[in-house]
């Protein structure tokens, strides 16, 4: 992100946000691309907050979430607070996991304490549970980790299995163990299976399946408006 001008980045977020808004997507996530092993660096934090606030002003009808690459709940919530975002997504919310940047421990308690200090209970916290991009370093099952996340105070949970069948099985087992928080399915959702996904989960997270296949390098328009519309039509049809 740092190798692009703010003007280019503003064009990028506004162009693609309008695609989602026109298709009827209710919420989008703004994510930085800075690979940082420790806390989020000040420049990345400032740029992401500025882009978030710009996006909310340009496309106010769509809800906004914040997710950062750094293992830094204070940064995520600070950006959401400054930008007027609706939620944050936090990875490794409970337990401990090995990631590409090294081991990371649960950030849930720190996140809840900082949100309370901000006085911003209106910023929802969505917790990834055994995210597909990390390897758990302890032996708890995904459904047990989901219980931890719920008890810690997450407002919603994101469950993603190793494959499609595993994702659906994890959601089913989480429900069977008494998870009451909303559950989002976090991977492998497409136009063809969104109905099945929404029969199990309260919502879905989708990105790659809706991207343009013909986008040249450097083009700011990355998501396909027709695919996004078809996806939302299928999602609405599945909910009657």
Image (tube, grey):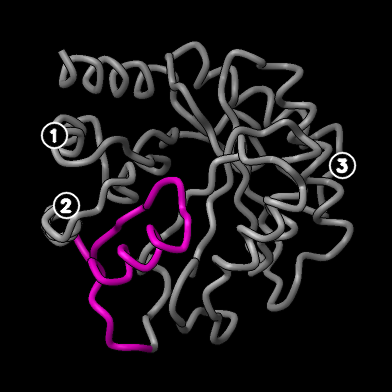
191 relative to 45 in the view: left or right: left
Q: Nearer the viewer, residue 94 or 67?
A: 94
Question: Which residue is under mark 1?
Answer: 199
Depth order, front residue of 224/184: 184
Q: Which residue is mark 2?
A: 175
In the structure shown, which secondary structural element does the residue marked by tag 1 occupy?
A: helix
Q: Residue at x 53, y 32 (%)?
A: 28
Q: Nearer the viewer, residue 179 or 85?
A: 179
Q: Position of residue 90 (x, y in %)?
A: 54, 58
- The reply to whether callout 3 and callout 1 are in contact (CB within 8 Å) is no
Residue 5 numbered mark, or none: 3
**Does residue 12 appear to the left or right of 239 in the view shown?**
right
Nearer the camera: disc 3 or disc 1: 1
Q: CA distance from mark 3 to mark 2?
A: 45 Å
Quarter assignment of residue 167 = bottom left
Comparing labels 3 and 2, the label whose residue is closer to the camera: 2
- Which mark sits nearer the N-terminus, 2 or 1? 2
Decide: is 133 above or below 239. Answer: below
Q: Is residue 166 left or right of residue 220?
A: left
Spot occupied by residue 37 in the image (x, y as percentages of width and height): 68, 78
* Position of residue 133 measured from the top left corner of the image (x, y, whole percent): 41, 69
Q: How many marks?
A: 3
Which span is picked out in magenta? 138-163
Q: Residues within 10 Å of mark 3 (few under 14, many from 20)?
A: few
Q: Position of residue 139 (x, y in %)?
A: 28, 87
Label 2 Cα neighbours within 10 Å, binned few <14 / some 14-19 / many ≥20 = some
Say which element carries label 2: helix
**Vertical side of 5 occupied by 191: above or below:** above
């Amino acid at each position: 992100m740092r190798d692009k001008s703010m003007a280019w980045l503003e064009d990028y977020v506004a162009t693609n946000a309008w695609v989602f808004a026109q298709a009827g997507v209710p919420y989008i996530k703004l994510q930085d691309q800075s690979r940082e092993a420790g806390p989020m660096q000040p420049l990345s934090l400032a740029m992401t907050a500025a882009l978030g606030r710009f996006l909310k002003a340009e496309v106010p009808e769509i809800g906004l979430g914040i997710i950062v690459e750094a293992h830094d709940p204070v940064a995520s919530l600070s950006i959401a607070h400054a930008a007027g975002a609706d939620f944050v997504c936090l990875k490794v919310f409970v337990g401990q996991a090995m990631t590409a940047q090294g081991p990371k421990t649960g950030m849930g308690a720190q996140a809840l304490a900082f949100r309370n200090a901000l006085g911003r209970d209106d910023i929802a916290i969505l917790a990834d549970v055994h995210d597909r991009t990390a390897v758990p370093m302890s032996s708890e099952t995904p459904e047990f980790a989901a219980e931890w996340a719920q008890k810690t105070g997450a407002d919603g949970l994101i469950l993603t299995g190793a494959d499609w069948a595993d994702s659906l099985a994890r959601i089913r087992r989480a429900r069977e163990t008494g998870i009451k928080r909303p559950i989002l399915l976090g991977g492998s959702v497409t136009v063809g299976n969104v109905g099945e996904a929404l029969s199990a989960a309260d919502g879905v997270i989708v990105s790659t399946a809706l991207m343009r296949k013909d986008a040249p390098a450097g083009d700011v328009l990355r998501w396909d408006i027709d695919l996004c519309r078809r996806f939302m039509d299928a999602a609405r049809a599945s909910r009657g």
